[in-house]
Amino acid sequence: MGRCLPLAIASLVAALATTPAAAEGPLEVERQTFGSDDLWRVVSYLCVPSAAIGLPLPCAEVKGAGANGIALLAVSDNHILTIPTRRISGIESPELQRPNLPNYWQAAWDARRLISAGEALRLDRSQIGVALNSARDRSQDQLHFHTGCLGRTARTLIGSLPPDPGGGWRRVAKPLFGGRYRIRWIAGEDLSATDVFGLLEPSLRASPAAMGRQTLVVAGVRLPGGTPGFAVLNAQGARPGEAHGENLLDFSCRS
């Protein structure tokens, strides 16, 4: 047990992280429904204290100690959130520039093992994605990564482009769900040696305002010869929906 949320708070947690989609596509973010600090309260007031007695409910897991901990929260069977136990607002936070922070992207990639569909469908790495929304396109002001199945539209796009591991960013010709993305590839079985935030230009990372407009999506791929790797997608948005990388995921795992 521990993977499914208690019924009393399941609907609350689902709404906190933006409503899970039955299929891939644009989602509406409703900041008015719940407070923007509610996800932080769930982690800090419930998951972390409960983990101290060996039962991290409503989270599935809490790994690590103190401010360097990481909580995994199952919004649904196929939608897992990875949340720092350190107070970090989101992608725009200068806190993410600090050295020696946990590798949150690696933790979110590892969280794919909690996706229930993987047991029945034997999901390949190319079917999994991790998304981090922009400041404008999130409901909660606590950093959280969405792990789920990669939607068919994103998989088709990635599969249509010749991979270039070690190369730089290249523009994607067609918009994806209102976002104009660029893409780059990295080699590796996992993200343990990769600073995903560091793939963005230093000028972006130096500006909280600019970072707040970014969304990042990391998708598992198989490079030529079957070598494992990742496609990293980035979009910048000035209006709602333009930098909502979560739209590229399909939490039904049906597409």
Image (cartoon, rainbow, N blue to C red):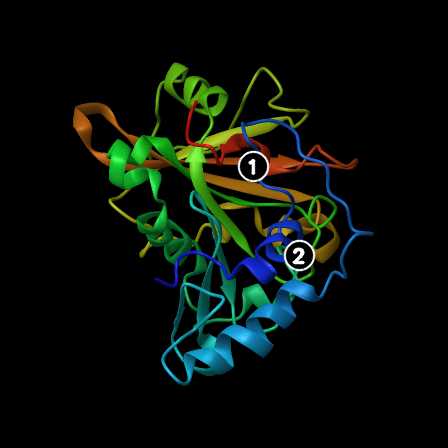
Figure label count: 2
Q: Quadrant of the C terminus?
A: top left
Quarter assignment of residue 185: top left
Q: Position of residue 70 (x, y in %)?
A: 45, 68
Q: Position of residue 206 (x, y in %)?
A: 65, 57
Is residue 143 among the parts visible in the rendering?
A: no
Q: Quadrant of the N terminus?
A: bottom left
Q: Is 202 left, or right, of 64 in this rendering? A: right
> Callout 1 environment at 10 Å: few (<14), some (14 to 19), or many (20+)?
many
Q: CA distance from mark 2 to mark 1?
A: 14 Å
Q: Position of residue 214 (x, y in %)?
A: 64, 43
Q: Residue sitting at 31 percent across and 56 percent down?
A: 192
Q: Position of residue 122 (x, y in %)?
A: 24, 34
Residue 40's place in the image compared with 21, above or below, is below
**Nearer-N-terminus badge (2/1):** 2
The residue tagged with tag 1: helix, strand or loop? Answer: strand
Label ID, residue 92 = 2
Task: State the residue lying farthest toward the left.
Answer: 225
Which of the two residues, 12 or 91, is positioned nearer the viewer here?
12
* Residue type at the position of mark 1: Asn
Q: Residue sitting at 59 percent across and 33 percent down?
A: 247
Q: Is 203 left, or right, of 101 in this rendering? A: right
Q: Residue sitting at 54 percent across and 21 percent down?
A: 172
Label ID, residue 89 = none
Does the residue at mark 2 contact the one at mark 1 (Cβ under 8 Å)?
Answer: no
The residue tagged with tag 2: helix, strand or loop? Answer: loop
Residue 112's place in the image compared with 160, above or below, is below
Is residue 243 among the parts visible in the rendering?
A: yes
Q: Is 172 left, or right, of 31 in this rendering? A: left
Which of the two residues, 181 or 24, is positioned nearer the viewer here?
24
Label ID, residue 234 = 1
Q: Residue sitting at 74 percent across and 46 percent down?
A: 136
